[in-house]
Amino acid sequence: ETATHVRVGLFDIVTGNTRWLIDDPSRTISDASIKGVPGAKLVTIVETKDAKAVASLLDPDSGIETPIPPVPGTLIPLAPSGDGLWIALTFSSKQPTDLVLCDPFHPDPETYITVARVWDYVKLTRDDLTQAEDFRWKSVDGREIQGWLYRTQTVPARGTILYVHGG
């Protein structure tokens, strides 16, 4: 980390040198990890964009970074598992965190193969959960604030729950 931002680099234990792969103060990187199988290696980069975790895969040799195409919710590739599939985390306001097999370069939630089988262990269904809506407003100082709005499914509403956390 620097005084202004997080960088991603590879440290050479023989030479003691670091080769910076990402050094961009405009990016809010929250995680970087390298997973590999023989003959293949990519760095999973996770950054925060508009209060959402967004992943990409970075080839440390070429420097080419491939964003994960947008899907409903969040998809974070963890490691290749063979046959073009990866083990990945997926979650959203309508999907508890689940471990799945998927193609992160062509993700389609309908084709995810659950590994953790999270829906087998909860009494909830997707219909019990509310879709989060991106909600923005201006602060008294003019700064844009971002939050998530969850509209009630019951009419009339029975109350409001606010969860304010850091960020």
Image (spheres, grey):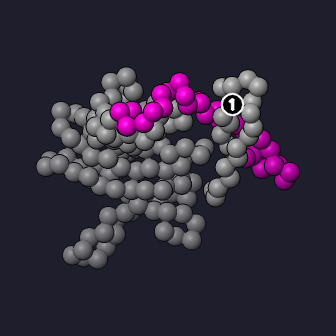
**Residue 30 left/right relative to 13:** right
Q: Position of residue 40 (x, y in %)?
A: 19, 47
Q: Position of residue 20 (x, y in %)?
A: 38, 63
* Residue farthest to the left, as pictured: 38
Residue at 70 percent across and 46 percent down: it is 162
Residue at 80 percent across and 44 percent down: it is 138
Question: Is residue 73 shown above or below 31?
Answer: above
Q: Residues within 10 Å of mark 1 (few under 14, many from 20)?
A: few
> Residue 41 or 63: which is nearer the viewer?
41
Report which residue position mark 1 lands on.
151
Residue at 58 percent across and 66 percent down: it is 4
> Residue 44 or 87: which is nearer the viewer?
87
Residue at 66 percent across and 34 percent down: it is 150
* Residue farthest to the right, as pictured: 140
Segment tinted magenta in the rendering? 118-145
Give the residue type at disc 1.
Arg
Q: Position of residue 126 (x, y in %)?
A: 49, 27
Residue 90 in view in this figure: no
**Residue 96 left/right relative to 165:** left
Determine the image quadrant of residue 160.
top right
Which structural element holds mark 1? Answer: loop
Determine the image quadrant of residue 99.
top left
Q: Quadrant of the C terminus?
A: bottom right
